[in-house]
Image (cartoon, grey):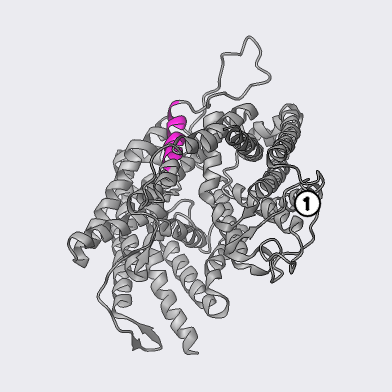
Amino acid sequence: MIDYAISLLTLALINAIIVIGLNVRWGWAGEFDLSYYAFVAIGAYTTAVLVGPPSGGPDPLVNPPDGWILGLHWPFIPSALIAMLVTGSLSAMLGAVALRKLRGDYFAITTVAFTFIVTLVFSQNFRLFNGFLGVFNIPQPFYDFLHQPDIFTYNLVFIGLCFVCLAIVYVVTEWLFKSPFGMTLRSIREDEQASAAYGRDVYIAKLKAFVIGGMVAGLGGSLFAVYLSSWNPSAWSPIEGFLIFAAIFLGGQGNVRGVILGVVIVTILIPESTRWLPEFQRRPDLYPALRNIAAGILILAVLRWRPQGIIPERHLNDTRASAGFRIPLLPQTRTPGA
Amino acid sequence: MTAITNAIGFGMVTAAILAVATVAVTLQYSVTQVPNFAQGDIMTLGAYAAYQTQVFAPNLLLEAVVAIVVCALFSLGMNYSLIQWFQRRGTRNIIILVVTAAVSLILQNSILAFYGGAPVEFKLPATEPADYGPFRWTSRDIWIMVCAVLVMLSVHVILRYTKFGKSQRAVSDDPQLARVSGIDADRVINLTWLWAGAMTGLAGFILAASIGAFDPSFGFGFLLVILAAAVVGGIGQAYGAMLGALLIGVAMEVSAVYISSEYKQVVAFVILIAVLLLRPSGLIAARAKNVVY
């Protein structure tokens, strides 16, 4: 029972890191980015490839024979940093392409296209990523360093590692939220033209948010890969990314604490609630499908009845006189072309 | 040489299917201003509706009609129950895009829960390929292309020569102005969803007939290709969509000859991204913005 609780808590911590990254992109900058989970996957693959042991060793399961990984056997921390660097620079590249000229819906289309391309590259490249079979037996961080402790102690160490990572990400994003940069981003989300008129560089601010989100995704993906100790292309899809969106809408867009609450509900509580139901042998897809349907209905219901989410975003500069005052969202005027 | 002409011939069949779906997307987008991410899954719905009909009563015409009716009603219902509600509250367009993506998630997984993830087989009378000039088509391919051409012609006639098409063009240009001039814009928008849904259902049916076996995610995978064709043609332009479909369809099949066929979708996406960057209004620039004709 305690092992079960620990595994759930670890998963919750990792998902919390992942959702914070998307919150920077969507909750603050307001870009409907469907490629986010691709960046988590890129982070996971980068780490998996870097920490993997050399090939051709005595045990074919631990040391794959054909040399499909680099065999660097790096420690976890530099690997995770490289993973963040890779996801950050790929975000910068995609952002430079997609954020410069493209309006919301075209941006979303471009990110879906990017996701499909990344999926195809990973599932077709056997040399580095073992194609659709995926990478497996990824070594766990600090396991050798701690002289191979028993599983219970090790799980506690790993949860500590996740907690430290989450704490760092949380503190940095809370600081960014209050910083002038965070305020600029949210002003862009509310009204791009007004923000530009006040001298903000909309493109640069959005690009920065995109890169920060990508780096957090890379960190989350790294932890995810070493936690699961295997990773393959079917483990992630645009659908998985959409579950993270469900978490953000539910918890409260833009609010870091809210989205963490949301991700716990969507990725832990909803899946675990079907764990105790009887299995149908002939319908292995039934429960995953029902979970996704539940997530979709949740998004629609939240958007319809509580668009601000469970914990709404704080408005920092609300004074007493204007605290109850909200400018109603005007219907979007039609912007022709891209 | 025959490899290339065969690929072009095959690309034209793909383009025919693509054209029907793309015209539906682009027409609906230009009139209602809603980018619909559920379009691919509505195609899946049409394909499964046809499959289910085949189980009960194997008749190709009946299957097509069921696919068209189911998708048209779903599309209209989606607008009526969800999209309109959000639009009336002045929800931002990007949130409406999220709503359609949520519908896509729900629809795709409902089909998965009901039929399972294993591909289902769509049985069709066997057809032998024959040579038509430099191309090699089966009679089924010919039927698909004839069907697509008829749909394109009907779109042209409706948009150009009927009062409904005229009011569609008016709503597409400016809904407020259309309302002021006495056009029932809500009715035009509802009918557009119905019509786009019907064409999407037909596209789902002919795609299913063309590939023979499909699973619940096949429409979503095709959505990106549709969007690529729509953007290449200039989103919101019915004739541009036809050109975009032809270009993307042929490019995909011809590239499959030279590089792995696994990567043929990548070719479509690369064209999509290139067009978005270099010529975001599409290859044929619109005479005025947001025109449907």
Question: Quadrant of the rendered structure where residue B207 is?
Answer: bottom left
Q: Give the x, y percent position of residue A33.
A: 59, 46
Q: Is residue A207 above or below residue A317?
A: below
Amino acid type at image mark 1:
Ser
| Residue visible at 64% across and 29% down in the picture | A256
Q: Dot 1 falls on which chain?
A: A
Q: Give the x, y percent position of residue B158.
A: 29, 57
Q: Give the x, y percent position of residue A315.
A: 64, 21
Range of residues picked out in magenta:
A293-305
Q: Is residue A235 above or below residue A199?
A: below
Would residue B19 appear left or right of A29 to someone viewing this image? left
- In the image, is residue A298 part of the stretch drawn in magenta? yes
Question: Quadrant of the rendered structure where residue A296 is?
Answer: top left
Q: Out of B253 and A11, give the one closest to the viewer.
A: A11
| Residue visible at 63% across and 52% down in the picture | A41
| Residue visible at 43% across and 48% down in the picture | B36
Q: Is residue A148 above or below residue B13?
A: above
Q: Out of A92 and B180, give the one closest to the viewer.
A: A92
Q: Out of A134 and B73, give the one closest to the viewer.
A: A134
Would residue A228 appear left or right of A154 to someone viewing this image? left
Categorize mark 1 by other alpha carbons within 10 Å: few (<14), some (14-19), many (20+). Answer: many
Q: Is residue B37 visible?
A: yes
According to the image, label 1 marks what residue? A79
Quarter of the image with the C terminus of chain B in it? bottom left
Q: Give the x, y percent position of residue B61.
A: 20, 65
